[in-house]
Image: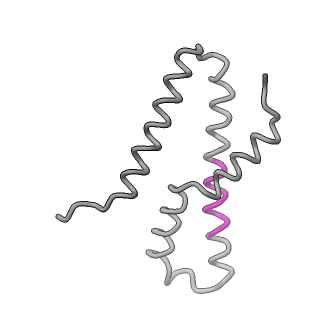
Amino acid sequence: MRADPARVFVRFAALTFVNPTTALYFAALTTAQGSALRGGAAGAVFTFGVFAASLLWQQTLVAAGGFAGPRIPDRARVWTFRAGYGLVAGYAITVALPLPAL
């Protein structure tokens, strides 16, 4: 059973808004480049650029999954899901825990 393409697009667009990597990059870049973004228009363009880049990445993942998905055996797909969830969980733990003092 195939998912409705419009629903998949909306799901990935919503993931773009809550993507922790996008949020961290956005926070780091605006902190580092805050003085360069002097006007509201520059900030809006920057915000749109971050959103567009993240959405493009999400859509690239959708296209790769759409291309490779039917070609991956069910057993391998289960392992790719497990690996993906493990990576996300590891990333979340890394972000949540404080870095050790140097």
Along the line of sight, the residue nearer the viewer: 33 or 20: 20
* Quarter of the image where one finds residue 22: bottom right
Judge from the rendering whether residue 28 lies leftward or rightward of residue 48; answer left or right: left
Q: Is residue 31 magenta?
A: no
The residue under the point 64% across, 30% down is 65
Q: Quadrant of the N terminus?
A: top right
* Left or right position of 63 against 2: left
Q: Is residue 66 left or right of residue 21?
A: right
Picture quarter containing residue 48?
bottom right
Residue 99: image location, x then y, percent: 28, 61
From the top left corner, tell me how far across and down residue 42 is, in percent. Answer: 64, 78
- Compared with 92, 76 (above or below) is above
Residue 78 location in percent, x, y? 54, 22
- For image coordinates 75% across by 40% down, the residue present is 8
- Residue plotted at (60% across, 62% down): 50
Image: 21 above or below 101: above
In the displayed structure, 62 sits above or below 14; it is above
Span highlighted in magenta in the image: 47-56
Query: Is 55 a magenta residue?
Result: yes
**Is 88 left or right of 63, judged from the image as shown?**
left
Report the residue at 51% width, 26% height from top: 80
Percent of width and height locating residue 89: 44, 44
Most foreground residue, 71 or 99: 99
Q: Main secondary structure of the magenta part?
A: helix
